[in-house]
């Protein structure tokens, strides 16, 4: 599915494709943009041609220097390609969308069914969490583990999963800021069993998303969890683009783990930059902060 946008006052279409070499027959590339039309309002354009990157059309490819770094894309370097540029490949930096973020937020508004389900679930989770008064803030927490804590010895991890002290300090930050009427935390995760077992979340004002628990339709439940997070006032994220996009779409304060990249890994050096991944007005908590906090205690 093609997503129309404007970059540097030029019309652009996003054709999102993932390689599927394990599929027998058919295209090596499979278009996944069709999924979003079931969750977001759009508007979206007609479906991109299958295998668009292999279609033989003349183009100039412009792409970033690394999957986690921002590279200004030279859209004027089109040569004899009739003005066609193929941009890629990851575009994970928020800086690619910074100038068009209001339009992106409007396009990625959840449809009525998804938003209604998220609103109802959030209301039920928050109900009774603060018996004396409605909580002043509802803070969503996204915990990505899965592939990021893989024990696969072949692939050296790029990311470092945050220690419990990070989540404790992030929650304390909001509790200090909204002490009067309190805060309720809503946890979403791809590993809810880990979250339930972690003592850092054993607090009376912590709730767990039931969407995360169901595995009947992972795509659908991921959309519901994302809608749930974007409906919260603020966000605490662990790793990955899911939590980052929850922060971008929510519009509130966002706390992230500053030392999540393993800078000793050659695959990270020159290819990832934490300052390119997260806006400067987001709140970062790193290992130095946690050590200093422990020393004060």
Image: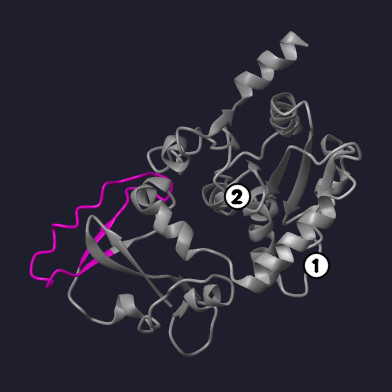
Above or below residue 38? Residue 249 is: above
Q: Quadrant of the N terminus?
A: bottom left
- Expressed as whole percent of the image width and height from the top left, the position of residue 113 reads 67, 73
Q: Position of residue 196 (x, y in %)?
A: 86, 47
Q: CA distance from mark 1 to mark 2?
A: 19 Å
Q: Residue 73 colored magenta? A: yes
Is 30 placed left or right of 148 in the picture? Answer: left
As displayed, is residue 167 above or below residue 72?
A: above
> What residue is at 62 percent from the left and 39 percent from the top?
160
Tell me whether circle 1 and circle 2 mark residues in contact (CB < 8 Å). no
Question: Residue 294's spot in the image, x, y percent?
Answer: 74, 15
Badge number at residue 243: 2
**What residue is at 42 percent from the left and 47 percent from the top?**
94
Up-down relation of residue 106 to residue 220 (above or below): above
Binning the other alpha carbons within 10 Å of mark 1 as few (below 14), some (14 to 19) or many (20 upward) gives few
Q: Secondary structure at mark 2?
A: helix
**Mark 1 highlights which residue?**
214
Which residue is at 62% across, 53% downward?
230
Instruction: From the viewer's perspective, tell me whether residue 199 is left or right of residue 98.
Output: right
Q: Residue at x 64, y 43 (%)?
A: 235
Q: Is residue 80 covered in magenta?
A: yes
Q: Mostly what secondary structure, the magenta segment? A: loop
Q: Secondary structure at mark 1?
A: loop
Read off the magenta span.
Answer: 60-86
């Amino acid at each position: 599915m093609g997503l129309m946008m404007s970059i540097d006052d030029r019309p652009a279409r996003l054709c999102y494709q993932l390689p599927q070499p394990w599929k027998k027959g058919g295209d090596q590339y499979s278009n996944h943009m069709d999924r979003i039309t079931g969750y977001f309002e759009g508007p979206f354009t007609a479906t991109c041609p299958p295998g668009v990157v292999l279609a033989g059309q003349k183009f100039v490819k412009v792409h970033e220097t690394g999957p986690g770094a921002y590279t200004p894309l030279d859209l004027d370097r089109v040569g004899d390609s009739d003005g066609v540029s193929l941009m890629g490949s990851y575009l994970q930096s928020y800086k690619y969308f910074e100038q068009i973020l209001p339009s992106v937020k409007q396009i990625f508004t959840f449809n009525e069914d998804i938003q209604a389900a998220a609103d109802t679930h959030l209301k039920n989770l928050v109900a009774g969490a603060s018996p004396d008064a409605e909580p002043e803030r509802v803070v969503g927490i996204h915990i990505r583990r899965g592939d990021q804590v893989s024990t696969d010895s072949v692939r050296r991890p790029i990311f470092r999963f945050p220690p419990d002290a990070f989540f404790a300090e992030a929650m304390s930050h909001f509790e200090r800021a909204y002490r009067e009427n309190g805060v309720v935390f809503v946890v979403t995760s791809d590993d809810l069993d880990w979250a339930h077992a972690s003592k850092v979340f054993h607090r009376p004002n912590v709730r767990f998303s039931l969407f995360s628990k169901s595995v009947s339709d992972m795509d659908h439940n991921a959309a519901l969890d994302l809608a749930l997070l974007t409906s919260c006032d603020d966000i605490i994220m662990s790793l990955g683009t899911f939590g980052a996009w929850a922060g971008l779409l929510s519009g509130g304060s966002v706390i992230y783990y500053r030392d999540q990249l393993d800078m000793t890994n050659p695959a990270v050096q020159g290819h990832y930059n934490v300052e390119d991944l997260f806006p400067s007005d987001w709140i970062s908590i790193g290992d130095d902060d946690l050590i200093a906090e422990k020393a004060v205690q």
